Amino acid sequence: MNMIKHSPYHHKFAALGATFVDRLGFSAPLVFTSTEEEHLATRNGVGLFDVYYQVAIAITGQDAQSFVDFAVVVDAANLEIGRSIYTSICSHDGGMIDDLTCFRISSQEYWLCPTPSRVAQVMHALTMIKSNFSVSVTNLGYKNAYLSVQGPLSRSLLSQLTSSDLSSEALPYFSFIESTVAGIPGALLSRTGYSGELGYELFYPVEYAEHLWESVFKAGLDFGVKPCGLGALRTLRLEKKYLLYGLDADEKTSPLEAGLGWTLKNKKTQFVGKEALERQLKEGVKKRSVLLEFEGLNFVPEIGAQIFSNGKEIGVVTSAEKGYSVGSSLALGYVNTINAKHGDELMVAGANGLHGAKIHLRSIYDPDGIRVHA
């Protein structure tokens, strides 16, 4: 491993006994105590995640609205200031360059937050189409620190540190505000996350990083806050059927194949990849992403494991983890569309033979999203 970069919290994590892994050259905590403990702490209390390697790309200028709307597959032109939305940037053939979150900062500014491993590719894609628009495209890099506070008690915790109204009425899911948090002015406080729980993501100047970590951790002691690593982030997201770009999607995957067709709704204006995706909508796609549930936690398939139906190979596993909240191992994979039927039984290859799995077309944990909207 070539872990040459440290987040502002690295010394804190080392003192807490974290096990580190290489994440884009950053020494990132994989686990502090156990993935299961950190997963359940987030589901039942508060989990604290450092995602410093996440960066934002700022789109500014008089054509920011039309440019972003042309770049992404979702209807970004009608996104209200103070709201964010999940979307994709595609190539002209409909393949996903990345999935990302789009923030409407002001009338002439958006932020795009891509998958950390895809920042260069997204920057290239945006640069290739910006010549017809009066905009600036700026990678904000690591000028901001980024802390994710997730779990059913996250609102109670952060309410100790800000006077801003964090209720769902004032700050609905996928909205954000500028707020003073722990005395830090101008922090962007966003009602988003990757855990499938009530949660908030904080962007703030990096010089305040240690202060905010200490403040959140101290305020969270009464709420059972736990520092959490990448291991828990992976298990939490899989229970929610959230894709991880690079495993569950790549440039050969379209949003329709990935189960993200809903992001195309109400998009009537021109955007990159529109013709290809409209053709797929009309003709259908040959493969579809599904969630596979295995009985118990003993078997977790390997990435690339073959998926079978009636003895015929119909797909492969793209990612797999233990679902600690649901008591079942889970996997994401692509299967032939004709086989992507909710509740059907499939077989997945393992070292000791085939293992039965049930198909889910929705998330297995909180499928109606009640908890994230709490």
Image (cartoon, helix red, strand yellow):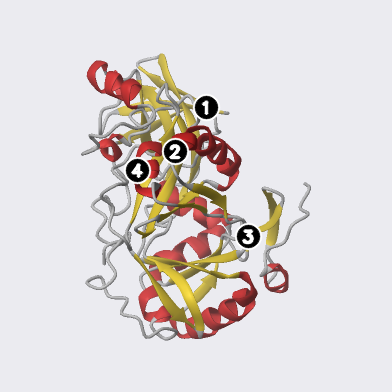
Label 2 crowd (10 A; few <14 / some 14-19 / many >=20): many
Asked if the residues shown at circle 2 and circle 1 are in contact, with their CB atoms under 8 angstroms apart, the answer is yes
- Cα separation between marks 4 and 1: 42 Å
Which residue corresponds to mark 3? 142
Query: What residue lies at 25% left-to-right and 37% top-to-bottom?
Result: 267
Q: Earlier in the sequence, mark 3 or mark 4?
A: 4
Q: Earlier in the sequence, mark 4 or mark 2?
A: 4
Which residue corresponds to mark 2? 331
Which residue corresponds to mark 1? 305
Q: Earlier in the sequence, mark 2 or mark 1?
A: 1
Query: What residue lies at 51% left-to-right and 50% top-to-bottom?
Result: 234
The amino acid beneath tag 3 is: Tyr
Q: In this rendering, would 26 be left or right of 101?
A: right
In which quadrant of the rendered image does the C terminus lie? bottom left
Q: Earlier in the sequence, mark 2 or mark 3?
A: 3
* Residue nearest the viewer, comparing 237 with 190: 190
Q: Is residue 57 visible?
A: yes
Tag 4 secondary structure: helix
The amino acid beneath tag 1 is: Ala
Q: Nearer the viewer, mark 3 or mark 4?
A: 4
Q: Earlier in the sequence, mark 1 or mark 3?
A: 3
